[in-house]
Image: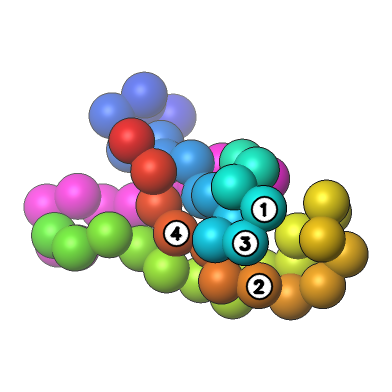
Amino acid sequence: MSQDNLIKLECTQCKSINYHSKKNKKKIKNRLELKKLCTSCKKHTLHKETK
């Protein structure tokens, strides 16, 4: 897995980085937003891609 495709997902409420994922940056130009379970908040929140 190359480092270019790795992204970090950050919780929008508590700002903690909980997930790492990969995406095809050639096909998906905008930032990824997923609703995931946050371990700090202990509820499902929106996670956005960070740098």
The alpha-carbon separation of the residues under discs 1 and 4 comes to: 12 Å
The amino acid type, in three-letter code, at marker 1 is: Cys
Residue wearing tag 3: 13
Residue wearing tag 1: 14
Q: Which image quarter holds the N terminus? A: top left
The alpha-carbon separation of the residues under discs 3 and 4 comes to: 11 Å
Pointer 1 with pointer 3, Cβ within 8 A: yes
N-terminal of the pair, mark 1 or mark 2, is 1
| Left or right of residue 8: residue 16 | right
Residue 19 seen in render: no
The amino acid type, in three-letter code, at marker 4 is: Lys
Q: Secondary structure at mark 3?
A: loop
Give above or below for 8 relative to 24. Answer: above
N-terminal of the pair, mark 3 or mark 2, is 3
| Left or right of residue 16: residue 28 | left
N-terminal of the pair, mark 3 or mark 4, is 3
Mark 1 crowdedness (10 Å alpha carbons): few <14, some 14-19, many ≥20: few
Pointer 1 with pointer 2, Cβ within 8 A: yes
Farthest residue to the right: give it.
Answer: 42
Q: What's the colour scheme?
A: rainbow
Residue wearing tag 2: 45
Q: Secondary structure at mark 1?
A: loop
The amino acid type, in three-letter code, at marker 2 is: Thr
Q: Which residues are magenta?
A: 18-28
Q: Give the label, 1 or 2, closer to the camera.
A: 1
Q: Give the label, 3 or 4, closer to the camera.
A: 3
Q: Give the label, 3 or 2, closer to the camera.
A: 3
Give above or below for 34 relative to 28. Answer: below
Pointer 3 with pointer 2, Cβ within 8 A: yes
Residue wearing tag 4: 48
The amino acid type, in three-letter code, at marker 3 is: Gln
